[in-house]
Image (cartoon, grey):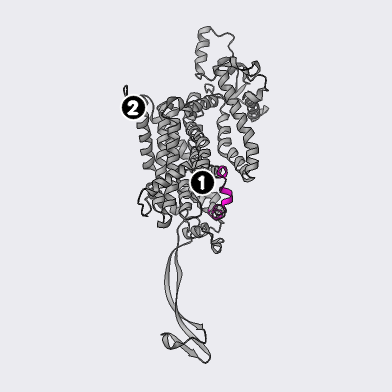
Amino acid sequence: LCEEDCLSYFKDLNTCKVAGDIFQDNAILSNPVAGLMVGILVTVLVQSSSTSTSIIVSLVSSGLLEVKSAVPIIMGSNIGTSVTNTIVALMQAGERNEFKRAFAGATIHDCFNWLSVLVLLPLEVASGLVSYLAKVTVSSFQLHSGQEAPELLKTLTEPLTRLIIQLDKSVITAIALGDESMRNHSLVKVWCKSSSFVSSVNVTAAATQNCSSELHCGKDSDLTWITQNISSQINTEKCRHLFVDSGLSDLAVGLILLASSLMVLCTCLLLIVKVLNSLLKGQVAKVIQRVINTDFPFPFGWLSGYLAMLMGAGMTFIIQSSSVFTSAMTPLIGIGVISLNRAYPLTLGSNIGTTTTAILAALASPREKLPAACQIALCHFYFNIFGILLWYPVPFTRLPIRMASALGERTAKYRWFAVLYLLVCFLVLPCLVFGISLAGWQAMVGMGAPFAALTIFVLLVNLMQSHSPTHLPKTLRSWDFLPQWMHSLKPLDKLITKTTALCCSPARLNDPDVVVVTPDTTNIKPESKKQTQQWYDNPALSLPEEISSEPRVFRLRGLERCNSTPL
């Protein structure tokens, strides 16, 4: 309930004043890579692909953005929307196995979107396939402009949000359309009611004008005057919200709302995880797990995944937010109620369901801009359809499941990897690629081509190392000839462990509430060793590595049984 309103207000306050300049300068967004990164960053900021795609559709319908430039931004919004459920997965970092499953379930959305973009974006740039199909579809229907579709969540939350902030939409529209006279006006709405009145004023006219045909006209010596009616408005009632008389700038109000909305969002996500963990346990979890993960009997087992897609699309259509649906599903994956194989089609269906928001927004466009708005909305739909056709029907092509599983295993072993992944994929990498793309095609190709070639080479060598190492030279049969930091995360893990250990000053070693845990297995019987190894129920970890390679861990008294790393 908080993401659709609180975060959208920050978007309106701080980005609308520069939106007109950015989107009118098509030299920036004519580069598809720059457009892709803009879509990622904007969606990460507003935490909803439904919101960002609706903005893009509105820009296309107003003529500020071309369809060709908007397609990469739509693709980027699909990637950025998965940041929310990745944050939700961090809430389950307290238990290794739950964290492994939850992080894999969250990143399966990322893997699908990145793989789809890597295939479809070059195809779209080269041939314009997605935009052409959308154009053909729009031309085959007789579309008529309609009213704006009602937003169910906004109807529930608007009474509360109107008490927090109200925005002057006329100023937002004028700034987006490039009206320079409105650039210094505040977006915070102060007056909610006004009355208009008409007054008669005498205006001096040209001396040569003939008053014989004018009803309200007269002459006074050498002057000719005409009576004109002038309408004016008087503000009568102020709005009632927190910032009506604050005197703060738009930037200050936006930063306050951003901090508050992020706090509310994180609190809501944490409560979702806690509530689902407490409710879905025992027999309830077993029943739900049996219902959701059950396949149809042979030979109709393949229909189960497509039915899950329909379920995910329907639920997302009802709540009008794929972020909410996938975020609620992430803790269920963590506690084992939903398997990763079943979460994959549910996520794909959610991608389809979120496209309906953009289509409904496009149908409310003006008549002259209706075809272009519907075309970009259908581009979002076709992008997800082609992605499903690439990475789902054939079991061998379901690479996102294997990629997400590998990320989950890595994160269970090194928990800090989840934070690093979040920062790199959704902040550092988009900003870096966007900056390089602004330097032009030469710089982007010069830096991107060697990186892409090295990535392909590493992937091929890893594939051959696991399947046919005899066909490789002896040097390339393993990566041991490289420095350890280039093929292992252990050096970085040791560095982070030492850094976090600095938080425990030497003075705290004498604290009675601090206990030094040093596992000792010298006098443990073989049967006890098996039981001890079961405590680390994680295939990514081995007991000798956990015991011998890690430094001493400082834990608070009462938490000795917690199975956690120093971070």
- Magenta residues (range): 16-34
Percent x, y for residue 23? 54, 52
**Magenta stretch: helix, strand or loop mostly:** helix
Q: Which badge, 2 or 1, comes first in the chain's sequence?
A: 1
Percent x, y for residue 12? 50, 52
Depicted 67 relative to depicted 413: above or below: below
The residue identified by callout 2 is 291
The answer for how far apart the CA atoms under marks 2 and 1 are is: 39 Å
Depicted 335 relative to depicted 87: above or below: above
Label 1 crowd (10 A; few <14 / some 14-19 / many >=20)? few
- Give the label on residue 260, or none: 1
How many numbered marks, from 0 up? Answer: 2
Question: What is the secondary structure assignment of the residue under circle 1?
Answer: helix
Label 2 crowd (10 A; few <14 / some 14-19 / many >=20)? few
Residue depth check, mark 2 versus mark 1: number of the one nearer the observer: 2
Percent x, y for residue 473? 64, 17
**Residue 251 visible in the current orientation:** yes
Nearer the observer, 427 or 281: 427
Residues under numbered marks 2 and 1 in contact, where contact means CB atoms less than 8 Å apart: no
Instruction: Check if residue 21 falls in the magenta segment.
Output: yes
What kind of residue is marked 2?
Val
**Residue 2 visible in the current orientation:** no
Nearer the observer, 294 or 21: 21
Depicted 459 relative to depicted 424: above or below: above
Instruction: Check if residue 230 falls in the magenta segment.
Output: no
Percent x, y for residue 445? 63, 39
Nearer the observer, 63 or 261: 63
- Give the label on residue 132, or none: none
What kind of residue is marked 1?
Ser
Q: Quadrant of the N terminus?
A: top left
Residue 441 is drawn in which quadrant? Answer: top right
Q: Residue at x 51, y 46 (%)?
A: 260
